[in-house]
Amino acid sequence: MLKSRLVVSIFSVGAMVLGSGMLCAQDYPNRPIRFIVPYPPGGATTTTARLVAQKLSEAWGQQLIIDNRGGGATIVGTELAARAAPDGYTILLGNFGWAVTPGFHEKLSYDVVRDFSTVSLIANGSLALLVPPSAPIKSVKELIAVAKSRPGQLNFGSSGGGSSSNLGALLFQSMTGVRMTGINYKGGGPMVVALLSRELDLIFVSISAVMSHIKSGQLRVLGVSTLKRSRTLSDVPTIAEAGIDGYELNSWYGVVVPSGTPRPVISKLNEGVVRAVKSPDVEERLIAGGLEPYSSSPAEFSKYVAKEAAKWAKLIKETGARHD
């Protein structure tokens, strides 16, 4: 009898929790939502967040307030989001850098897998592997051959440890066995200038940052970092196709929320984000910015975040990379 009462009690509590979650979702959102972007204002992260925020605001009749909280290579904004109430009224823009940062720090107040629930991916971007057009290198295989013949002599640009430009080059070295020298710059713009002036031999940089230079012939692109070809550079092979099987770096963006956010609320957020990403005007603007629209289920995104965090933490440990 006691066991039966216990089962009924547990069932009743579960039903109450599920019911409260359903009611919460039906009423959600009934006030403004804070959308934390763990980067300073400007750039692709803020632009991507604003595109989705605008669509959600239009659909739900509630304001989504972009809250740029840069600092600590995404740590400041992520800590703020992790401490927020798990009610769907604080959401966070997760991206490649957000998943990579924990690999550089043994002690953080949060875990990107444990302390966050995933909503949906938004977009996926590719890096271009570039050399000056005057360089005697016209393919990825030729680059590998030159780098092996001149260990440590080729210079690549980096936006600092933890940046996609840095990790793209480290992955390249790790998978080919070549040794190159990284030189740090304050962002992609200065790196491009340095490559144009032949201060650098190669760079990995966002396609959107160099499209004009590629079209004008000022820079030669050897490959792109995603496993699928970029829609904006469809005639350029992937680095995997061009000679490094399995090479992949995705500069992705997605929406996450604090762990404990009710499942019905996450489902409603997912529906809204997926609808926003698939709207023609958002797709057009993402593609124009060198990104591929890419939505997902919460479960798919969860597996992807865990895979990305593990992959880059392993590379960081093996190469001894550091945040600069």
Image (cartoon, rainbow, N blue to C red):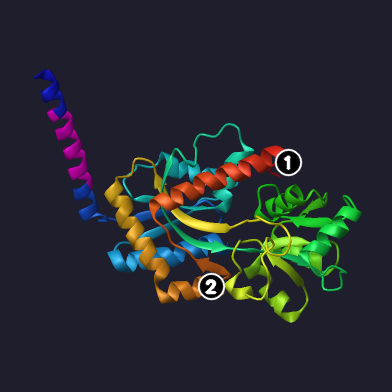
- Identify which residue, 73 or 261, lies in the foreground: 261
Say the numbered circle drawn on residue 287. Answer: 2
- Callout 2 amino acid: Ile
Picture layout, residue 106 above or below residue 223 = above
- Placement of the N terminus among the 4 image quadrants: top left
Q: Check the picture and name the quadrant holding the C terminus.
A: top right
Q: Position of residue 216 (x, y in %)?
A: 74, 80
Residue at (65, 68) in percent of width and height: 207
Q: Main secondary structure of the magenta part?
A: helix
Residue range corresponding to the magenta coloring: 8-21
Q: Earlier in the sequence, mark 2 or mark 1?
A: 2
Give above or below for 267 relative to 232. above
Mark 1 surroundings within 10 Å by alpha-carbon count, few (fewer than 14), some (14 through 19), many (20 or more): few
Q: Is residue 82 left or right of residue 63?
A: right
What residue is pinned by disc 1? 319
User: Residue sitting at 40 percent across and 48 percent down?
Assistant: 257
